[in-house]
Image (tube, rainbow, N blue to C red):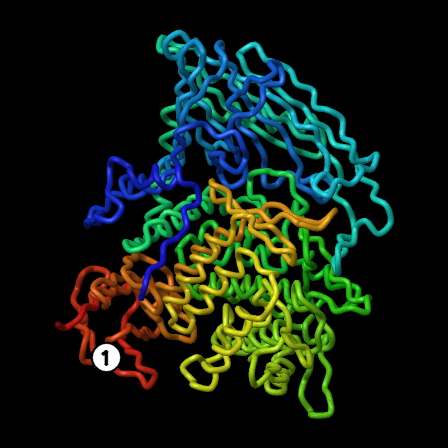
Amino acid sequence: MTLRRIAPLLPVLLLAASVCPVCNLMGYKPTSAFDWAAFLARHDFVWQTLPDTWGESAFIGNGNLGATIFLQEDPAAAGSKQLSWEINRADLYVALSRIPVGRVALKTAGAVTGGDMRLDLWNAEARGTLRTARGEVRWRSVALREPGLILIEAEGVGGEPPPGIEWHAALVRPPRSTYKQQSYRPDELHPPAIVTATDDGGFVSEQTYLGATPAPGALAVGDNDFGAVPSAGASVAAARALRSADAGGRRVFLVALEHAADLSAARARAEAVLAASAAEPAALLAAHRAWWRAYYPLSRVELPGAPALETFYWRQIYKLGAAMRADGPICDLLGPWYRVTAWPRIWWNLNLQLTYHPLAASNRLDLAESLYRNLDRRRDQLIANALPARPERDTAAIGRTSVQDLRSFVRTDRPTGAELGNLPWMLYHYWEFYRVQMDDTILRDRLLPLLAPAVNYYLGHTQTEADGLLHLRLTHSPEFADATDANYDLALLRWGLQTLVDSHGRLHLDDKNLPRWRDALARLAPFPVDEKTGLLIGRDRPLDKAHRHFSHLMSIYPLHLLDLDDPARRALATRSINHWLTVPGDDRCGFTYTGAASLLAMLGDGDGALGQLNQFFNFSFGKSTPDTIFLTTIFPNTFYAEESRRPGGSGGLTIETPLTVVAAVNDMLLQSHGGLLRVFPAMPAARFENLRAEGAFLVSGEWRGGRAVRVEIKSLAGEPCRLRVPGWTVRNPRATAAAADGTALASEITALPNGGLEIILPKNATLTLAPAN
């Protein structure tokens, strides 16, 4: 397999990572006491000059509160700049939209002349030097998870005294209108914040928001109706100096951002969180570092032959930790950060699914709860979204986009097709979350109460035709076209029905709908197929132009409904993927290439998968042709945006696209669908530890010299252990197994018809495999 060069995202940043003095990119050797600090240091962001744009900024976050750090203009001194922390919260919405809040800026005695900066992944800490005409300011900053604050520590050096801080409140306007250059309604002209300096060197900024009274029809977006606008409220940003300047010229500032239904409540929340931070800075930092040092080792991926890809991977693992928390909000397209966008909330027709997909295999299950706990809490709203079409309350759905309350009604009163698959697709990833743990309480008490009504909603859009089969009426295949028997929807419905039937059997449950589900599964129409091009968009609807979304290929990935060990199904999948990648047109974007990498990994095509990842990095630099709908950009800080070429068009940050690189790499290292662990299906020269697999297995492995030299599997639930490793047969690997207490266990290997191996592995036992010669 040939490893192609991955284009650098920013020469300064990747070069700085590659010359890290504490490690060597190609020669790093892991040990039993793995040196995480040295390993992650080679993936740090390093700026030799301070950035002055959002796309080059450092970013910190605690899963809800976040900041981007870069130089911005000093409004009090023309031509001068300040080092600024642009602050935002992932759960702060006004009138169905994320909004700008403001920024903290360091006040220095001398004019800023330059500086440098590093984002230390291991410590989740931004730090650097700010040079001024009078000396230097040495600073560092973190986003504390508990209490929820931004900590800024700054020290004056030389002739520069200890710096102060000030707050620059943002002018609050709806970003969608700003991005599209549309005029604002009167109810969107929110008053300016009232900012007051405090005696201790901090500030209080109080912002109230107007109640929204949108024009008729303004609540509808595509086939999505919000039904109502959340009430207006207020936010308070506040900071205080934890201590005055000490002998070393050091100051520590804590910054809070809280919101509530009214100003007094927001003020009380800000005061409370600041009062909860009475600990010494060292104690706050120690607690912050303890969380991150427990987070990173949950799994490990090393790619010795692709160092730039490895760097990008770990920067996304950092981003996920900064963007999510188990008790936090759902991660929308912005995460806890902010940039003007036409997409200022949650999108349910691909974006959210791709955002959360990497977490299960990466063993970051705590972060995933930020979505699944909120789905649990909002079950009644998901049911309400399907009303009044189904007043018996046995259905559930969600439209294309929502805010955190999940109020989003699917509009089925239009002649065009509706997007019905949003909730079922998200529930597939909830099912993944269950499958890598095999905790049946998750299945019984949390997932099935959502999946059953979601499938019932689908069934309400089916009809029996003359062939006796159950067909889907007109629906919308995301971002392409309406179709009957859309492959996207047929795949999700088939997966949902099969999962309901199998899960009720596993749990020995009965349900009045079981006969209906079994009958629907037996009679559901087959996937529409063309002999030459493979899977169609839908019945009589070919894929006849470029399509950035892989929605019609869902049966291949991620749902794994086609058995690729069957030659005919494999040939169908190959034709379908090849046609999707080569059909004329230019409607492609970043997730097209990462999705293609995962699809090709399903076929075991590692060269093709790596080639698609190379195209992702090479493509996403704003290149375009006259047919291009979106200009796409991977910013130097690894965020990604799509900018419309059409006047008044949509665009903005989409947090999920860079995160899909993690999913693609995981798919190249380990696959676990269909009851079979596929270890190293499509990736050479790699080491990984503790990736999670379906069946609740923690899997580790190393591929070196053209073969797998080690595979280790720990069973967390005692499920059947079946695996396939390239080149291994029943006589090849040497196997040893041990119970949790270290007691040796028998490790008899049985050959499977599909070329796999089966080994009895009790719960909490560990199996180690290595070549026999």
Left or right of residue 514, residue 176 in this image: right
Total marks placed: 1
Relative to 448, does residue 523 appear above or below in the rendering?
below
| Classed neighbour count for the residue bearing mark 1: other residues with Cα under 10 Å, few (<14), some (14–19), many (≥20) | some
Residue 458 image offset from top left, x and y in percent: 68, 72
Q: Amino acid at mark 1?
A: Thr
Q: Residue at x 47, y 25 (%)?
A: 277
> On the rendered image, what quadrant is the C terminus found in?
bottom left
Q: Quadrant of the N terminus?
A: bottom left
* Residue visible at 40% across and 11% down in the picture: 135
Dividing the picture into quarters, in which one does residue 289 lie?
top left
Indicate whether 150 appears above or below 737. above
Secondary structure under tag 1 reads loop
In which quarter of the view is residue 102 placed? top right
- Taking the image as shown, residue 725 lies to the left or right of residue 206, namely left
Name the residue beneath numbered marker 1: 729
Q: Position of residue 641 (x, y in %)?
A: 57, 47
| Between 150 and 636, the one nearer to me in the picture | 636
**Foreground of the two, 245 or 433:** 245
Question: 57 or 475: which is nearer to us?
Answer: 57
